[in-house]
Image (cartoon, rainbow, N blue to C red):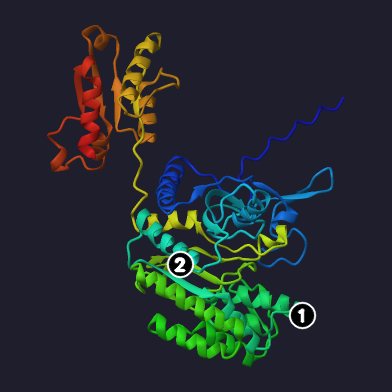
Amino acid sequence: MAKPKKTPRPKAVTPKGFRDYFGTEVTERKAMLDQIAEVYHLYGFEALETSAVETVEALGKFLPDVDRPNEGVFAWQEDDSDWVALRYDMTAPLARVAAQYRQDLPTPYRRFAMGPVWRNEKPGPGRFRQFYQCDADTVGAPSVAADAEICAMLSDTLEAVGIPRGDYIIRVNNRKVLDGVLEAAGLPDTEEFANVRGIVLRTIDKHDKFGDAGVMALLTEGRKDESGDFTKGAGLATEQVELILGFVNGRQDSNATTLDRLASLVGEAKTGQEGVDELRQIATLLEGQGYGPDRIVIDPAVVRGLGYYTGPVYEAELTFEVTDEKGRVREFGSVAGGGRYDDLVKRFTGQAVPATGMSIGVDRLLAALRATGRIGSTAQGPVVVTVMDRDRMADYMEMVTELRQAGIRAEVYLGNPKNFGNQLKYADKRESPVAIIQGGDEADRGVVQIKDLILGAKIAQSASLEEWKDRPNQYEVPRAELVSKVREIIESYN
C-alpha cells in the first residue's frame, strides 16, 4: 500500500513586490504621520478613512500605461458580476465619497487621508506594489487660492517633519499651459489624439530621470533601457518633440521671467493663456504669504503622469544629494505631488466639481529623513524584568506594572527562564536600556539588581574607553527605589 503523500509545507516568503515592516519602521512612520496630521489640522482639514476596496467602475481608468481593463490594479470579480479592486490611490475614493455624500458634506470639503494603496505594476528596487500615501484635498473650491494653499501646506509639512528650507523645492506648473503647447505641436485635446497625449504626459513626467535624449527617444522611435528592454516610441516628428522640450525646459531665473516665457509659448491659445494667468495668481498669493522662490517656484517641467489633472500641478522635490545602490551621487528627488482635477467627481454627478489636492509618498519621505540622519537611530527597547524564580512570577509582574504606571516601557521575560544568559541576550536583541534582576537572596534582603545594558554595550565595544571605565554598569538598590533608579539611568542617556 502506497504511503499517503505529505502535504508540502508552505514557503515562508513575502510575495513579489511586497515587504514587511518591523518595530522601528512602524513607529517612525506613525510619528511622522502624526506630525503631518498636526499641520493638516492647523489648516482646517478633517480626517477621512475610506474602504481599501472600491468598484472598478468607481476607480476609473487613470493609471499610467493602462492598455487593457483592470491593468495596474489588483481586481477580482464578485459573484454578482461586479468587478472590485484595491484602491490604487486616495484620490479616486475621495471623488466617490464627495459624490455619494454631497448632500451631507460641507462645501468646500477639506479632508486628509493616510493609508496603504496597491498597484499591480512591475516591482523594482525601492518600488513596491503596496505603499503608504498621505493625501490632503479640497473639493468644491474653484479658486486657485485653494491650489496655492495646498502648496503652502506642503511646504510647511516638509519643514515640520524635518526637511529644512534649502533641502527641498516645490515646483508648480499648469496642465492648461501644456495643453496650449500640445495644440501648437499638432496634438489637440480630441479623442483622436487622446492616446498619444497620454504617452506625452507620462514621458514628460520622467524627464528628470531620462533627460532630453530619453524623452526625445520615447516620443519618437523608442528607447532601450540599461537592461535591454525596449519601449516603443510615440512616433512624433522631431519638430513636435523639440517644441515640447522647449516647454519642459522653459524655467527661467525667476517666476516672473518663467511666466513671460510660457506666455510666449502658448501664443493665442485660449486655454494656455488661462493656465499662465492662473500660475501668475498662485505665484502672487504665495509670495504675499512669504513663500518665495526659495521654497516654491514655477517650473514647466512638472507634468504629473496621471490623466485626471486639469489645471495647476505641483511636485515637491528634495534637492540634497544621496548615494544610490551603485555608489552614484544623485539628488533624492520627488516625495510628493498633486494638482487640480475638476472633472473627477463629475464622473459620478454629471456636474463639474472643482477639486485640488496633494499626495505624499510616505515611504520615500521616511527614506529621505533616514538619509539625512534625522531619524533612524536605534530605537530604545523596553526595560526587561528577568525571571530568576518562576514561582515568583507575581513579584516580577508587580515590578513591571510599577514601571509602566511610571510611564516607563517595560516587560517581563516570558520565554524559558532556565538559562539566565538567554534572558540577557533577549534584552540585548530588544535594545533594552536596563535589565532588572531579583533572585531569592535579593528578595529576602528587599533589594533588586539593576543592570545598565547601554553602558555594558559601550564597554563591550571598547573596554579601554576612558569615559566609562569608572562607571558601574550594575547597581543594587532597595526594592522601593526600583522605579527612580531605572528612570535615572534612562534619563542619563537622553
- Above or below, 33 against 230 in this view is above
Which secondary structure, mark 1?
helix
Write down the quadrant of residue 155 in the picture: bottom left
- Furthest-top residue in this view: 444
Which one is nearer the viewer's eye here, 152 or 365? 152
Residue 130 position in % (x across, y down): 59, 51
**In the image, 151: left or right of 185?**
left
Q: Residue 311's quadrant in the figure?
A: bottom right
> In the rendering, at what x and y percent does residue 69 appear?
77, 61
Q: Residue at x 66, y 75 (%)?
A: 199
Q: Residue at 38% x, 59% y: name it.
A: 156
Q: Which residue is mark 1?
A: 192
Residue 462 vs residue 306: left or right?
Answer: left
Tell me if 452 is positioned left or right of 236 in this view.
left
Pick out the residue farthest to the bottom: 239
Question: Looking at the rendered structure, which numbered label has been put on residue 148?
Answer: 2
Please tell me whether residue 17 is drawn above or below residue 215 in the rendered image.
above
Along the line of sight, the residue nearer the viewer: 57 or 412: 57
- Is residue 298 shown above or below 408? below
- Along the polypeptide, which appears first: circle 1 or circle 2? 2
Q: Amino acid at mark 1?
A: Glu
Q: Position of residue 51 (x, y in %)?
A: 64, 45
Residue 286 versus residue 461: which sits nearer the camera? 286
Residue 421 tag number: none
Q: Position of residue 108 (x, y in %)?
A: 55, 56
For the point 72% across and 75% down, the residue is 195
